[in-house]
Image (spheres, rainbow, N blue to C red):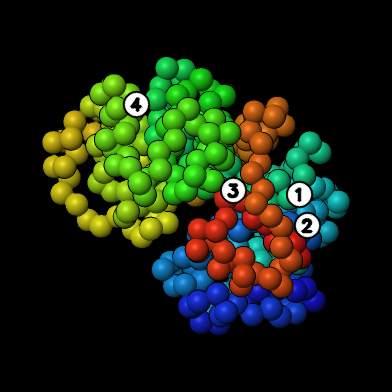
Amino acid sequence: MTKTVRVFETGEPEVMRIEDIAVPSPARGEVLVRHHAIGVNFIDIYFRSGSYPVSSLPFTPGNEGAGEIIGLGAGVTNFKLGDRVAYVSTLGAYAGERVIAADRVVKLPKSISYEAAAAIMLKGLTAQYLLRQTFRVKPGNTILVQAAAGGVGLILCQWAKALGTTVIGTVGSPEKAKLAKKAGAKHVILYREEDFSARVKEITKGKLCDVVYDGVGKATFPASLDCLRPLGLFVSFGSASGPIEAFNLGLLSTKGSLFATRPSLHTYSAKRADLEKMARELFRVVASGAVKIPLHGAAPLDDVANVHRALESRETTGATVLLP
């Protein structure tokens, strides 16, 4: 039996119940992982609230975790009992133990703690594909990071700076501005007090940005497009303020023949070899110290409802992990 969060009906944080559940033995191609830390992400709120549909109820939230392998299914040859591992995968992470497909798990180097790994598998791999694949940033580029003090935002700022990129970040408070600045944002805009697109134009002396990374969604669109140079790329990777509504594609033409994309980690990491390559690059940049993991805090699994409330109310910065 293992402590598990279960959601029988979608809604507010209190719909999450803590129960003791029997964990099945791993089937062929699966491993049993005992969690040491569990990642918390805004996508967990989308599933819990019903914004994102689930295939059936009840379900267990959570898409990432880190721990040790305590069970091996038939046919699993690339892992052994006791291996330190981390993953980002399907729902089911909010539990003491879980069974998961072995091809979604990566080995965790000793240089990365369980807490750090649980905090970066989704956010860090997201930053990897955004910066190294969706738009491969390089020295001389100027980028805009919306919500620069958030979990993904702080990683984007650090990693982009290490790559020689000029980072402009938007934040909601002076406290978050300090965090974004410390993480590598050369310029920080308080979007509640300033017109961020006008400020971007001032900062860049009219040259604007090569790419905008926007995990906010509805509240920052279409103003994000006004921050892009002609032929620039708008990358929408989240919807913290609600989804972007349908718009006339002609808008991209009138604002400078812009490109727009809505990528997902699932697509970029679908192949095992790609997942391993992405994870190696992420672990390397973290181990080097170029990217420090912004841990907001760690809370016991029993406190999951309060953790969700804090995340929804924008009280947190960086990442929060649950401890089973």
Pointer 2 residue: 36
The residue that disc 3 covers is: 318
Between disc 4 and disc 2, whose residue precedes?
2
At a point 46% along the width and 65% down the height, the residue shown is 46
**Which mark is on residue 271?**
none
Q: Residue at x 76, y 49 (%)?
A: 114
Q: Residue at x 85, y 52 (%)?
A: 81
What amino acid type should be assigned to the residue bearing mark 2? His
Looking at the picture, how far across and down is residue 272, in whole percent? 60, 42
| Circle 3 SS class | loop
* Circle 3: residue type: Gly
Element marked by disc 4: helix
Is the Cβ of the residue at disc 1 closer than 8 Å to that at disc 2? yes
Q: Which mark is residue 203?
A: 4
Q: Which residue is mark 1?
A: 114
Residue 30 sits above or below residue 167 on the image: below
Observer-side mark, 3 or 4, equals 4
Q: Position of residue 196 (x, y in %)?
A: 32, 40
Image quadrant in which you'd find residue 184: top right
Characterize the local packing of mark 3: few (<14), some (14-19) or many (20 or more) Cα atoms within 10 angstroms. many
Q: Position of residue 185 (x, y in %)?
A: 49, 31
Name the residue type under label 1.
Tyr
Q: CA distance from mark 4 to mark 2?
A: 44 Å
Q: Quadrant of the N terminus?
A: bottom right
- Percent x, y of residue 230: 23, 27
Mark 3 or 2: the one toward you: 3
